[in-house]
Image (tube, rainbow, N blue to C red):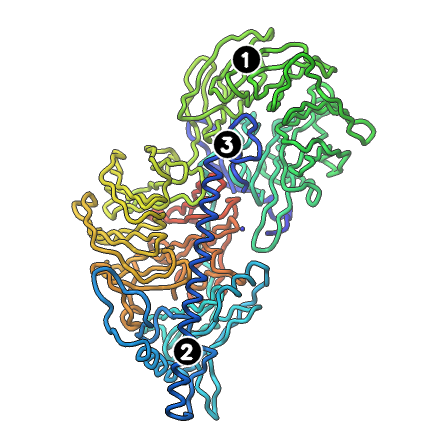
Amino acid sequence: MTRSVRRESEGAVLSGRIRKLSCGLRSTPQMYEPRDDSASAASSMEVTDRVASLEQRVQMQEDEIQLLKSALADVVRRLNLSEEQHTLGARRGPTKARPMIATLPLRPTVNNGTVLPKKSGGTLTSPSGTGSRKDASLSGNRSTVRRANSNEHMGTLTRRDSGESKGNRTRAGSTGSNSSGKRSDSTKQRDPVFNAGTRRVTHCKEEGYVKMFLKGRPVTMFMPRDLVEPYCLEARADLPSSKLKLDWVYGYRGRDCRSNLYLLPTGETVYFIASVVVLYNGHTDDIKCLAVHPDKITIATGQVAGTSCDGKLPPHVRVWDSVSLNTLHVLGTGFFDRGVACLAFSKSNGGNTLCVVDDSNDHVLSAWDWQREDRLADVKCSNESMFAADFHPTDSHVIITCGKSHLHFWALEKGLLVKKQGLFEKQEKPKFVICVTFAENGDAITGDSSGNILVWGKGTNRISQALQGAHEGSIFALCMLRNGTLVSGGKDRRLVSWNSGYQQIQSVEVPELFGPIRTIAEGRGESVLIGTTKNFVLQGSLDGEFTPITQVAILMSYGALAVHPCKPIFLSCGYDKQVSLWESRTHQPIWTKHMDESAQSACFHPSGAVVAVGTHTGRWLVLDTDSKDLVTVHTDGNEQLSVMCYGPDGNFLAIGSHDNYIYIYAVAENGRKYGRVGKCSGHSSFITHLDWSVDSQYLVSNSGDYEILYWIPSVCKQVVSVETTRDIIWATNTCSLGFEVFGLWPDGSDGTDINAVCSSNEKSLLATGDDFGKVHLFSFPCSQFRAPSHAYGGHSSHVTNVNFLYDDSFLVSTGGKDMSVMQWRIV
């Protein structure tokens, strides 16, 4: 969810920087667990985050158990089939064509129109054909012997072995194919067997299917009749003629980062979200800190360690030009551990020195001559949480760091960093010293978790003045304005201004909707910029109201994304229980609604009048698109609803659940009236994707154990005939398994790398989101293995959703835990 950092490739200039309306923001943008908003604001997650993490872990374990159950059931079936064949052979004697037991199928979804006995097809109808297991087995054997004469071509994809993939292959059990061999003097053709080091893709031209293996399980995909003759597995697919250009990034990272909001002399505001600095996108993973050089043009940003499909991504610092967006220097590759926690430029020597604190256990403090990329000194700073580091404004050899229960004054002398501890003396030592700034006379000013502001005399490590109880709760941010006014903000959502004698001037409270104040920056004129823990950037004055100029679109992982069928708007929702409708042209929210539960999936009715939202508890609701009013509420099962999909004619709604069922509802009155038709039963694992046919008569589904099943939703009946399903034209292509999309799977994939798939409305492009923070753009159909694609970075976490707007002008993608929604222009 790795690539080496190459300055020359990643520091490329991004053209067409975007101007944010009414606030002067310019955005040409490109995982770390969210941290606590309590006094520490450190590495431990909130209780709700921990619960969500545990729920996800339990769900993953349940999925693994389900896979094991499926594999065990398959082994039992194969043993029974083997015993029956052995008994039959003993009665009849040897034959010329004995089925190869080693290549029996792993419970194929479709087997030449014959479905092996398993679950019933649905709740409305009984499965046709209730013959015995023996009859079904004999039927299956006859069909596989007949297929042995087919011409089957094979391509091999090399796969890197890892501990996890080996474990998965072992658990998968049997690795047979969908056809077995027939011995002959002239030919000895059989399906390829999955090997530990390779993933094989086979093509059976006679019967018109392509088969690949994911985690050892065969996935058979039948092609349309008109492609059976001309199709060639070895043919090369073309790159799409269109490309993506990052147009806008919705969101700001204020929940677990600080000192990350600045105003540049150009009037542009710089901040970061995911692996994108709004202005610049050269980073490869989560950005955690940002510093502006005294020249107000040069900027340094630090990122965490990450991973990609190619390997590890080391943490490092990038120094770049905010005008040209060119990377000037890359520091610390291979030196920093885990990530970069905080950094700062020196002020009194022209900004020639950069101090950096990494996220290792010892939080190593290092000083750099960044222009020469030379490390001047380093020292273990503290084994406790670190929140801030800054140079003294008049002494380039003095660095102040603060964190859990400490304040340190460092002197850079002869290649060494010498420490003096801040002495609290009579003052009660706070649990956390959270932020630091400097007065005009050189005094250091700190804010702590006790709500106190402490003033430390210039050149000393002692407190000269204390403002007890300046805030109720932790002080998260301090900012010294140009006119000498000190501004403080904290957990109590109050923004307080103080004069040079540290007397309170006034106090303004930020609305609860926006959350506690995380960082403060001086704006243009008399204005002030505020970043909040709920990921808003606000603009206002110290004696007036504050208005948001950017807003988070999704706060937690596995959020839902839905695009309107005929307007340039889209809906996002997630574990933050907020549902937001966005205007893609103005980049502003149309409305936001708070729900009682975390959202998991969403879909607009074809009329666009309503939108259905599914939750993680099995409850789903329908909202009016214009007014956000609640239309209706229903509940199906008690597990998360992973996908919701209206039929193209608007008469049916299909809901895929983690309880392995697909619930079907009849829809009337333009999406305002619902009646349950039944549920489709047949999958042995949770539902992952759904697509409707263009005539709304058929439904195709994918599941967590890589099954492809077809349905007649009006009667909740499974379709088992290949000849019926192979020529169906699908209205959408969001399923990750199918003949038209199988080429998107990369070499070495374990079956879980691709999280989201979507074809363009004109059916010329296919977009995917993967576990490595990449958005890929393929040509559609994507039915050649190793299909080439354009790959785009920006997300620092796994990409959970991708979707084209109604007119294919933009693609929208959501990140898992990087708290961002990105809008890409199709060019």
Q: Between disc 1 and disc 3, whose residue precedes?
A: 3
Secondary element under disc 3, as helix, strand or loop, is loop
Q: Residues within 10 Å of mark 3 (few under 14, many from 20)?
A: many
Q: Amino acid at mark 3?
A: Arg
Residue on which the image places disc 2: 179
Q: Between disc 3 and disc 2, whose residue precedes?
A: 2
**Is 220 on the left or on the right of 8, as rendered?**
left
Which image quadrant is residue 161 in? bottom right
Which numbered disc covers residue 26? none
Q: Nearer the viewer, mark 1 or mark 3?
A: 1
Q: Position of residue 205 (x, y in %)?
A: 40, 78
Residue on which the image places disc 1: 469
In this rendering, the answer to whether 576 lies above or below 131 is: above
Residue at x 55% of width, y 10% of height: 498
Residue on which the image places disc 3: 255
Q: Amino acid at mark 2?
A: Ser
Q: Position of residue 256 (x, y in %)?
A: 53, 33
Q: Nearer the viewer, mark 2 or mark 1?
A: 1
Cα distance, mark 2 to mark 1? 76 Å
Q: Between disc 2 and disc 1, whose residue precedes?
A: 2
Residue at x 49% of width, y 27% of height: 531
790, 186: nearer the viewer: 186
Q: Position of residue 648 (x, y in %)?
A: 25, 54
In this rendering, the answer to whether 583 lies above or below 643 is: above
Secondary element under disc 1, as helix, strand or loop, is loop
Q: Amino acid at mark 1?
A: Gly
Can see residue 664?
yes
Secondary element under disc 2, as helix, strand or loop, is loop
